[in-house]
Amino acid sequence: MLIRVVRMTFRKEAVAAFLENFDANKEKIRNFPGCSHLELWQDENHKNIFLTYSIWENETALNQYRDSELFKSVWSFTKTLFAEKPIAFSSKKIQELP
């Protein structure tokens, strides 16, 4: 299992366009082979900062998504809306407490 988090800071006037695009594509992303979970988070204090939290079968599955036409179309649009460079990282869960 691979956990992917991407932190994105948008221009304030671009937030609505990002949300509309995410809404139009979220089911396709979530149902992409190898993706078992997808969440969109919004920073509590900075309403133009969003994070995606996704769970992938493994790094190969994530890379297949990143090489797909779906990712290329979503990301090419999304990156035009940024106010800052996004921050992305992949992790694995070590422990979870109930």
Image (tube, rainbow, N blue to C red):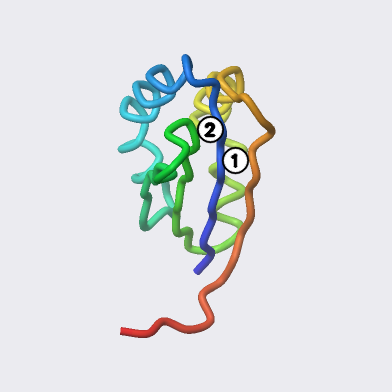
Residue drawn at (58%, 46%) of the image: 64
Q: Reply above or below: 10 against 39.
A: above
Name the residue beneath numbered marker 1: 66
Q: Nearer the viewer, residue 42 or 44?
A: 44
Name the mark on residue 91. Answer: none
Marks 1 and 2 sit apart, C-alpha to C-alpha, by 6 Å
Q: Are marks 1 and 2 in contact (CB under 8 Å)?
A: yes
Q: Earlier in the sequence, mark 1 or mark 2?
A: 1
**Element type where label 2 sits in the image:** helix
Q: Reply above or below: 84 against 11.
A: below
**Element type where label 1 sits in the image:** helix
Assign the C terminus to one quadrant of the image: bottom left
User: Going by the image, does 85 lie left or right of 96?
Assistant: right
Q: Amino acid at mark 1?
A: Arg
Residue drawn at (46%, 46%) of the image: 52
Q: How many marks?
A: 2
User: Going by the image, does 58 lie left or right of 39?
Assistant: right
Residue drawn at (39%, 23%) of the image: 21
Q: Reply above or below: 82 against 38.
A: above
Give neighbour class at mark 1: few <14, some 14-19, many 20+ (Cα, 10 Å). Answer: few
x and y, in percent, of residue 39 in the image:
36, 49
Q: Amino acid at mark 2?
A: Phe
Give neighbour class at mark 2: few <14, some 14-19, many 20+ (Cα, 10 Å). Answer: some
Q: Quadrant of residue 67?
A: top right
x and y, in percent, of residue 89 in the image:
63, 55
Q: Quadrant of residue 26?
A: top left
Name the residue beneath numbered marker 2: 71
